[in-house]
Image (tube, grey):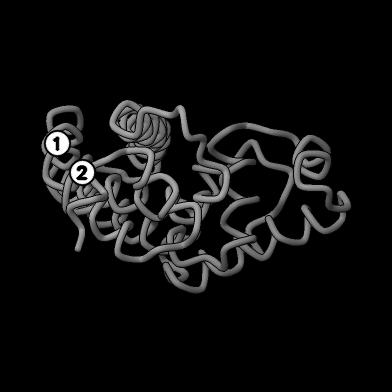
Amino acid sequence: MKRHFNDQDILIKGLKNGDEIAYVHLIEQYHNRLCNYANSLIKDDLIAEDIVQNVFVQIWEKRKKLKHELSLESYLYKSVHNKFIDEYRKGKAVMALEKKYMTALELAIDEKDEVQEQKILTILFDAIHQLPPKCKQIFLMSKKEGLTNIEISQCLNLSKKTVENQITKAFRILRNKMGEKYQTILMVIFQNTSNPVS
């Protein structure tokens, strides 16, 4: 039944028409190879699997835009590579953020205690990860990417007041989740911000 999909033109036509058998055939043909390729780039089986799954989801969502002259294999490998680059950039940003927080923790804790620092850092990152989506996005744009409130408002097409409210909300949630004993640490980490931790 699926054998005729070995012809790429027929496969692309099937995908464009929303043929689920064609889509299953595509996954069966390329899934393992793409996972191996992704893992060779990122050295993490789970993230590699996520990257490949996202690529297949993207193919299905944009199937109507596929061109008949397209080389599916090249397109798939290029898509995996592009998503790897996205993951790498996110990882680099997180590492920079962690470095900043570790420096702040060393200043906030009287005696250097690596176990305590790691524990607090874990609590902080978990709390940031659990922020409401829009609140988290705005908070990270401000504190990770260093954008001003005006820049964020222009980028997201929101009012400056909305951005300010979301950042204040993020601080409030972080303080509540981390507990009052971490109040000083939060203040040290975000000492350059105009938004109070309240």
Q: Amino acid at mark 1?
A: Asn
Q: Which residue position is annotated with label 1? A: 39
State left or right for residue 175 relative to residue 1: right
Question: 94 or 1: nearer the eye?
Answer: 1
Residue 93, image x, y percentages: 42, 32
Q: Is residue 6 visible?
A: yes
Q: Amino acid at mark 2?
A: Ala
Please give the count of numbered marks on the rendered protein.
2
Spatial CA distance of label 2 from label 1 is 5 Å
SS type, badge 2: helix
Q: Which residue position is annotated with label 2? A: 48
SS type, badge 1: helix
State left or right for residue 143 relative to residue 75: right
- In this rendering, the answer to whether 110 lies above or below 91 is below
Q: Is residue 91 visible?
A: no
- In this rendering, the answer to whether 81 lies above or below 16 is above
Lower position in the chain sequence, tag 2 or tag 1: 1
Q: Residues within 10 Å of mark 2 (few under 14, many from 20)?
A: many
Residue at image x 68%, y 33%? 147
Question: 123 or 105: nearer the eye?
Answer: 123
Residue 24, image x, y percentages: 26, 60
Residue at image x 44%, y 48%? 13
Residue 3, image x, y percentages: 17, 53
